Image (spheres, coloured by chain):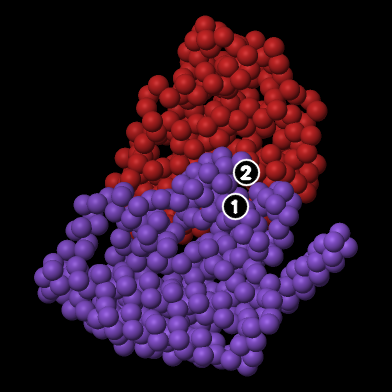
Chain colours: A purple, B red
Amino acid sequence: MKISFPHMGHSHIAFKWLVENLGHECIVPPEPSKKTLDLGVRYSPEFACIPFKMLMGTYLEVAEQGAEVILTSGGCGPCRAGYYWVMHQYLLEEMGQDLKVIAFEPPLCDIKDFWKKLRWIRKTGGVSWKHFAQVMKITWEKIKAIDDVEIYSHEIRPYEIKKGDTTRALTRALDDLDKAEKIDQIMEARNAGIRRLDEVLCDKLRNPLKIGIIGEIYVVLEPAANHYLQIMLGEMGVQTHRSIYLSGYTRESAITNGGDAIYQIARPYLDEVCIGGHGVNSIGETILYSQHGFDGVVQLAPFSCIPEIVAKSIIPSVSRDFNIPVLTLFIDEQTGKAGVQTRLEAFVDLLEMRRQSNEKATRLVV
Amino acid sequence: MSKIGIPRTLAYFVYYPFWKAFFEELGHEVVLSSPTCRAILDDGVKEAVNDACIPIKIYHGHVLDLVGKVDWIFCPRLVSVRKHGDFNTETFCPKFLGLPDMIRQAIDKLPKLLDVRVDLKKGKDELFQVFSQVGKQLGNGVDEIKRAFPIAVKAQKNYCKLLSREILPHVALEMLEQNCKQIPQETEHDLKIAVVGYPYALYDAYINAGLLKILEKEGVKVFTQDMLSDKTLDRQARSLPKSMFWYFSNRAVYGGLHFMKQKDIDGIIHVTAFACGPDSMVDRMLEIECRRHNSTPYLSITVDEHTGEAGVRTRIEAFLDMLRYRRDRDEN
């Protein structure tokens, strides 16, 4: 069976390995490009959010390459993302594409359905449960290793002397991880990747600004959707910290259903635990970033994303109370890279001035 | 005895008779905001977050209209009203879930907010519990609440009865307001059209530029999903691969599915707000389902701050012309 899946950050490295080792052929989704988005926009409902459109485009691209099945995630609401697969299936059928979308609903909602789908994949791939479990474990390790390397790259980038060095080192580290087959190889590749990043020529005397990145999971995780915002900020000399990583997200939302702590923090502003997506998280994390001494926060969300709109309407008060500037970027198919860059540069300038005037104030007091 | 303000939008069109009866029975005065108008919309646009949809902006306007006139504003946090959906997780749109918080952050000099969490998933008794909380916040005793509650339930039942007799909700609300028992006479019509969408987009004549009036004048009998019983609506759930997550959206989709299976319905109109999140799914799904069900004619009308009467009228006229042309062709 030719299987494909949505593209999200660097996770395709791990998922490719998973699909291939379960005895299927993997059609690796291409990184979303202008063409992907154009295709997606043409066939998607006008007000669907940009993740929907990008996935639509990706599905059509992999269908062209011969994919027969798409594996994706479901959801139990109230965020629209849980309904994507139904709509995608409808639209693919309308277009006459012979592509089946199989979605894994959160196991906590429907454990039977979850097992049924897992068994189907295992059986059609012709592997034993034991092998299956092992492959899952290694995939999980890969996901974690990928995240580790990426997180570290965002810490290093603002110090780099030659622009682009860190990104090159990261690409090579990810290539190594792509080739790793066993758990010890993955650990080795991970450590080698971290070393590679350490070897990047750095100016350690810099004191970069620190910006936290919050918002909707897809536009935060997929650099092609947010115009490589983290790399852009890094090369402007800003250290970025992202609130969501796939490894963290899967652990919290899909398995343990945790994240209660963040709801408690957001409670004074939004007294409802489940407004869908990462709406509540956006509010709670803004507070956390402020408490951890970050200089500013960038909120990323797709245009017309409901939970993030609710969050956006509340964030001004949080920003005022906790004295932390927040820049909200709503992204749609019209958003251009230059537009994002200009706004980020202005935001960074403001933060820089703010820091200087704060320092001056403290010096005067002393 | 206090004055309770109720914004004349969103859930007003669905639950107002209940609220009014309950508060008045407890001895409070209910003050409605003025019907939506330009000033309310402008105020709302100014105060609300710019990315919000027009119904939410208008809600902000209605709240502002009540500021200074009342002691309380009734702004319940509507979470869910039933166990429904594939995982029993049906809720209202996330904007409803965050509404009291949004209002608090956006509007200065706000009167006290009568904010209660309505989550009826938990059980049969829950509605009473919710309204006991409301009553207690207003300083009423348990006895009074116990007496008022059944009266409110009855008022709501009467309202539903009117709706089931194919009376449009805004007309029914007016009838209840004026205590009029007489059923309005049916106007002459040669077409039957189902209009589906959210109550606050359908029955607020300002938002949709008088869409229902236009239809009526053009000789159309209008049906909406709110005239159908819950049972009829929920039966449609089976024909979908997965139910949607939002109460009003499910009603609109089920209503649409029901009407497209009726032979005597000539066409379906879906009214949606610009950039409405749930509707991006609802709209395309209805379109596809209409095509699959015998190619039922389908028109989608998107409303926003700039919707003008001429625009809506032109599209309606074109749609009706097409329906009549199609009917004549079929008859020949």
Pick the front one: A120 or B41? A120
Q: How far across and how far down the image is residue A235, in percent? A: 64, 83
Task: Kindly report the distance in space between the C-alpha atoms of the residues bearing marks 1 and 2.
Answer: 8 Å
Q: Amino acid at mark 1?
A: Ile
Q: Earlier in the sequence, mark 1 or mark 2?
A: 2
- Asked which quadrant contains residue B7, the reply is top right
Residue at the disc numbered 1? A283
Give the residue at mark 2: A269
- Which element type, helix, strand or loop, lies under badge 2? loop
- Going by the image, does B278 lie left or right of A321? left
Identify the chain of the residue marked 2, using the numbered disc in the image: A
Q: Which quadrant is home to the N terminus of chain A?
A: bottom left
Q: Is residue A295 left or right of residue B294?
A: right
| Any part of residue B171 in sight | no
Q: Nearer the viewer, residue B104 or A285?
A: A285
Q: Which residue of the protein is positioned furthest toward the front in this rendering?
A: A366
Q: Quadrant of the C terminus of chain A?
A: bottom right
Give the image location of residue A335, x and y in percent: 64, 74
**x 13%, y 67%: residue:** A129
Question: In the picture shown, does residue B276 fall above or below A208?
Answer: above
Check disc 2 and give the amino acid type: Tyr
Give coordinates of residue A161: x percent, y percent: 64, 90
In x, y percent, where is residue B135?
Answer: 58, 17
* SS for callout 1: helix
Residue at the image position 50 percent from the left and 24 percent from the top: B130
Where residue B91 is drawn, which disc sits there? none
Q: Residue at x 62, y 38 (%)?
A: B100
Dots 1, 2 in contact, CB < 8 A: yes
* Quadrant in which residue A180 is drawn: bottom left
Task: Please tell me whether residue B89 is drawn above or below residue A100 in the rendered image.
Answer: above
